[in-house]
Amino acid sequence: MNLSELNKIANAMVAPGKGILAADESSGTIKKRFDAINVESTEDNRRDYREMMFRSTEAMKNHISGVILYDETIWQKAKDGTPLVKVIEQAGSIPGIKVDEGTQPLPNCPGELITIGLDKLAGRLAKYYEAGARFAKWRAVIDIGAGIPSHNAIHANAHALARYAALCQAAQIVPIVEPEVLMDGDHDIDRCFHVTEWVLKETFQELYYAGVPLEGIVLKPNMAISGKKNGKRASVQEVAEKTVRMLKNCVPGAVPGIAFLSGGQSDEEATAHLDAMNKLGPLPWKLTFSYGRALQAAPQKAWGGKAENVGSAQRAFSHRALMNSLASKGEWKADLEKKAA
Ligand code: 5MM
C-alpha cells in the first residue's frame, strides 16, 4: 500500500469547496427515482441521465471532487463512445465505485441487516482500479426502532466495513466508510446522536483492529438529526452542534475528511446543516457532502427524461452543487436559494 498516494486522493476528495456526487443508485433504487419522474429505467435512459450529469461542466469542474458509480455505469460509454469514466476524469473529477452488494437480513437479529460483498472483493477491486476507480464505497445500514439496533448488528456491520476498507487500501483504492444510521422512524435527535456515536466508536475500533491507516479513508456518516416521523424537528443549529460534538467524540483527527450522506433530508436542509456545521469551525477534519438525493432530486425533476430539458437539468445540478460547495466552506446564505428560484 502506498499510503501517501491514498492520502493524496482522500484529500482531493474533500478539497476546499468540493464534495462528492453519489450517483451509485443500484438498479432498484434508480428505478424508484425514474418512476417518480415517469421515465422508464432502461440501460439507455440510465446512461443518458448520468452522462448529462457528468457533462455538467460548471458543477463538475468547480464543485464535484468525485463521483460514486454503480457497477453498470463504470463500464458504460457516452453517446459519442467515450467511456463515462473518461468523461468524469476530463471534467477534473475522480471516478469511484460502490462495491457493496446490498444487504441481507442478519440471522437472529429481527429487523436488522448486514451488508454483503466481501467474497471475491479483492479481485473486483483490481478490475475497478484498472477501469479508473480511485476510491470505493461500502454502506452499512443501521435502523433505529423498538429494541434495535443490537450490538450484534452494529458490530457485524462495523467489522465488514473494516474488512472492506483494508481490502480497498491494499488495492490502492481509498475506501469511503459509510455507516448509515437511518433517519426513518419517530426517534428524537438525542437517540440518533447516541446510536450514531455507538456505531462510529465501533467502526473506528474495527478499523484499528484491521490495521487501516485513517489518513487513507473518507468517512461518510449521517448527521445527528430527528427521525422523519418525529413531530418535533431539531433546529438547524441543534443539528449542527450535536453532529459536530458527536463527530469530535468519535472521529480521530487523522481522518482527512467527512463527507455526509443526505439520507432523505430536503435539498435545502442538507445544505443548511452542512453550512451551519462549517460555521462552527475550525474543525479537525474537512466537512463536506457526498449527497445522492439532495444533489439529484432537482435535476431529475427538471430533466424528466427529455433531451430538450438537458440544459435546465444541468443548471439545476450546478445550482445545488454550488450551494453545497458554499456550505462546505460555511459561506452559504438562505437568500442565495431564493435568488436562483
Ligand atoms: C445514491 O444512493 C446510494 C445507493 O443506494 P442503494 O444501494 O440503496 O441503491 C446510497 O448509498 C447513497 O450513496 C447514500 O445513501 C447517500 O445518498 P443520499 O441520498 O442519502 O444522500
Image (cartoon, helix red, strand yellow):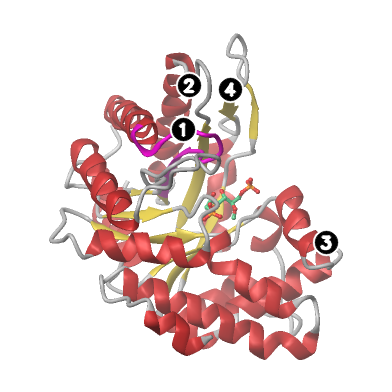
Callout 1–callout 3 Cβ contact below 8 Å: no
Residue behind mark 3: 41
Seen from the viewer's position, the closer of residues 298 and 115 is 298
Please name the amino acid that badge 2 sits on. Answer: Pro
Query: Which comes sooner in the sequence, label 2 or label 4?
Result: 4
Q: Position of residue 70 (x, y in %)?
A: 64, 55
State the SS at label 2: loop
Mark 2 neighbour class, 10 Å CA radius: few under 14, some 14 to 19, many 20 or more: many
Q: CA distance from mark 3 to mark 4?
A: 29 Å
Please name the amino acid that badge 1 sits on. Answer: His
Residue behind mark 4: 112
Callout 2–callout 3 Cβ contact below 8 Å: no
Q: CA distance from mark 2 to mark 4?
A: 7 Å
| Residue 308 visible | yes
Query: Which comes sooner in the sequence, label 2 or label 3?
Result: 3
Mark 3 neighbour class, 10 Å CA radius: few under 14, some 14 to 19, many 20 or more: some
Q: Tell me which segment is drawn in magenta.
A: 175-190
Which mark is on residue 187?
Answer: 1
Please name the amino acid that badge 3 sits on. Answer: Ser
Callout 1–callout 4 Cβ contact below 8 Å: no
Q: Is residue 59 above or below residue 164?
A: below
State the SS at label 3: loop
137 relative position to 1: left or right: right
Please name the amino acid that badge 4 sits on. Answer: Glu
Which mark is on residue 149?
Answer: 2
Q: Residue at x 64, y 72 (%)?
A: 84
Mark 1 neighbour class, 10 Å CA radius: few under 14, some 14 to 19, many 20 or more: many
Q: Position of residue 151 (x, y in %)?
A: 42, 15
Q: CA distance from mark 1 to mark 4?
A: 17 Å
Residue 238 inside the magenta-drawn segment: no
